[in-house]
Amino acid sequence: MGKLKSHSGAKKRLKRTGSGKLTFKRNSRNHLLLQKSKRQKRINRTQLVHHTNERALQHLIPNL
């Protein structure tokens, strides 16, 4: 049987926390931050993946 391969797009976007949950980085946090409001910057921090989507993402990244 062949090796399980991780989805390369998911590898770049998802990370695992110490407790085993998946996190991802929200958009709009890279550049042009002076003109964005504090609320917009606060909302777009790192966020946990919702538990309903977590099982589907496990199949994409079995080795992460």
Image (cartoon, helix red, strand yellow):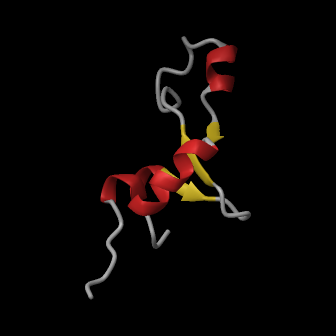
The answer to whether residue 31 is above or below residue 57 is above
Q: In terms of depth relative to the viewer, which is nearer, 24 or 29?
A: 24
Please provide percent x and percent y for residue 37. 63, 12
Q: Residue at x 67, y 59 (%)?
A: 17
Q: Is residue 23 left or right of residue 14?
A: right
Q: Residue extending furthest bottom?
A: 1
Q: Nearer the viewer, residue 64 or 45?
A: 64
Kindly identify the residue that appears in the image at 63 percent across and 23 percent down: 41
Left or right of 58? Residue 21 is right
Residue 49 falls in image quadrant: top right
Q: Is residue 53 left or right of residue 59?
A: right
Of 37 and 52, nearer the camera is: 52
Residue 48 in view of the camera: yes
Question: Residue at the right extreme?
Answer: 19
Above or below: residue 18 compared with residue 47? below
**Residue 43 image offset from top left, x and y in percent:** 65, 24
Instruction: Tell me if 26 is positioned left or right of 40 in this view.
Output: left
The residue sitting at 61% across, 41% down in the picture is 50
Count every numbered label the image shows and give the total.
0
Does residue 49 appear in this view? no
Residue 53: x percent and y percent? 53, 45
Q: Quadrant of residue 18?
A: bottom right
Residue that extends furthest to the left in the rendered view of this protein: 2
**Is residue 6 shown above or below 24?**
below
Query: In this orientation, which residue lies closer to the viewer: 45 or 48?
Result: 48
Quadrant where the N terminus lies?
bottom left
